[in-house]
Amino acid sequence: MTYIPNVLLTSWQRSRRHRLLLRLVQAEFTRGRQLDRGNAQSASIGADFGRLGVALWADVENSDAQNKVRKAQLDLLNDWRNAIAHQDFDPVKLGNANLLHLAQVKRWRRVCQRLARSVDEVMRAHLQTLTGRSPW
């Protein structure tokens, strides 16, 4: 394919090139994404962001000392989700518990919200480093 500088293209051609490039980038960013094949466990989230060159969990844990505990809670949430979905309640995998209470579910919701805010901040900083501008 021959390279044609943008200045020589019509606005329609530039727009078409932009759309094609956007589709290509979107397809590459989502190809093989672990979140498409499983639960949102810390390992799969880390792997998916790692494909973008982000050491997600190291950065998230550095951004807030509580995030290491929150990450462990995210994994416990997934263990409970799998236990419920597969009716396989192994107390060893479930934090030595055999009963789930609404209060714990509410704590997990807060954990997920706080982790999401930290991931958002880590990604904002990463993108700003790459582009020189804050994306949001």
Image (cartoon, rainbow, N blue to C red):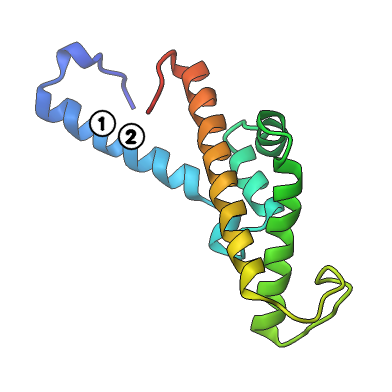
Name the residue that disc number 1 marks: 18
Instruction: Name the amino acid type tagged 1.
Output: His
Q: What residue do we see at 61% from left, 68% from top?
A: 105
Q: What residue do we see at 50% from left, 37% from top?
A: 120
**Residue 54 higher or lower than 11, as above or below:** below
Q: State the image quarter where residue 89 is shown.
A: bottom right
User: Is 135 positioned to the left or the right of 72 in the image?
Assistant: left
**Secondary-structure class at tag 1:** helix
**Residue 85 higher or lower than 29, as above or below:** below
Q: How many marks?
A: 2
Q: State the image quarter where residue 82 is shown.
A: bottom right
CA–CA distance in space, label 1 to label 2: 5 Å
**Secondary-structure class at tag 2:** helix
Quarter of the picture holding the C terminus: top left
Note whether residue 42 is visible.
yes
Instruction: Name the amino acid type tagged 2.
Output: Leu
Labels 1 & 2 near each other (Cβ < 8 A): yes
Name the residue that disc number 2 marks: 21
Q: Which mark is residue 95?
A: none
**Residue 9 higher or lower than 83, as above or below:** above
